[in-house]
Image (cartoon, rainbow, N blue to C red):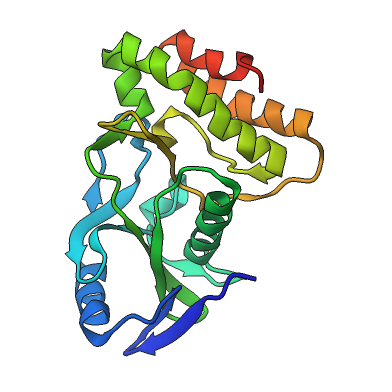
Amino acid sequence: MIPIITQKYKSYSFGSLSVLNHSQLETLIKIFDEPNDKTDAVLGGRGSIKRLDLDGFGPVIIKYNTRGGLIRLFIERTYVRTGKPCNRIEFEQLINASKLGVNVPEPVAFATKGSLFYRGWLVIKEIKNSETLASVSLKDEDRTDQLLNEITRQISILIDSGLYHVDLHPGNILVNDNNEIFIIDFHKARVFNAGKEILKDKYFTRWKRAIKKHRLPETLNEVFSKGL
């Protein structure tokens, strides 16, 4: 069990690994309902976000729960509570993935507002000076080649551990200026029990489809031919 600390503050419910103080809570709720920044990265790997410096944590990213598909045109940010909020799922899966040895952003907190109908936010530490693997692959072939072995290693951990990211593609991998890679967007992640080979095929199918759709370099598919 992950020891999550829950706090009620005004009309918000927070979850975190350590108690958030009054200043931190006030800073966050002031940001939550401000307009969010739409990413323009290739593949849109970071969704709807807001950046700020949070006392005690430094630079963080606030990720807004937003819907995909046609429904987003009508209710982009409101969800019906049918179980754990997706931001809590992502918070927990980031912790799980990190314990397995996967490089992921460090989770800070998650928050919801509302009961049956709710809005949600996830707060994670910012990966400084980073861009998506998709973006890197379109402008620097040599650098991309240098990253493939580490990406393969990270995906191997997910497969061997039976953790299904669901939406893993080159837009959901960040690369910092030290060529460290970080896998992001675990809000759909779940345990997969049908076997490693089936899981590998699922990962490769999603990965390959993204490369074809967004006309990314075919060399990225080599990730799945390096011993996975």
Viewer-proximal residue among 75 and 31 = 31
Location of the C terminus by quadrant is top right
Query: Residue at the spot x=55%, y=45% of the render?
Result: 101
Q: Position of residue 153 (x, y in %)?
A: 56, 29
Q: Position of residue 18 (x, y in %)?
A: 41, 77
Viewer-proximal residue among 225 and 70 = 225
Using residue 125 as the reference point, say whether residue 184 is left or right of it: right
Quarter occupied by residue 137: top left
Location of the N terminus by quadrant is bottom right
- The image shows residue 31, relative to residue 202, as above or below, that is below
Quarter occupied by residue 132: top left
The reply to whether residue 65 is visible in this rendering is no
Q: Position of residue 87 (x, y in %)?
A: 47, 63
- The image shows residue 41, relative to residue 118, as above or below, that is above
Query: Residue at the spot x=28%, y=13% of the render?
Result: 140
Using residue 195 as the reference point, say whether residue 4 is left or right of it: left
- The image shows residue 82, relative to residue 204, as above or below, that is below
Query: Residue at the spot x=60%, y=15% of the render?
Result: 226
Q: Position of residue 209 (x, y in %)?
A: 54, 22
Query: Residue at the spot x=45%, y=52% of the render?
Result: 71
Viewer-proximal residue among 84 and 18 = 18
Using residue 151 as the reference point, say whether residue 127 is left or right of it: left
- The image shows residue 29, relative to residue 185, as above or below, that is below
The reply to whether residue 205 is visible in this rendering is yes
Using residue 22 as the reference point, say whether residue 145 is left or right of it: right
Total numbered labels: 0
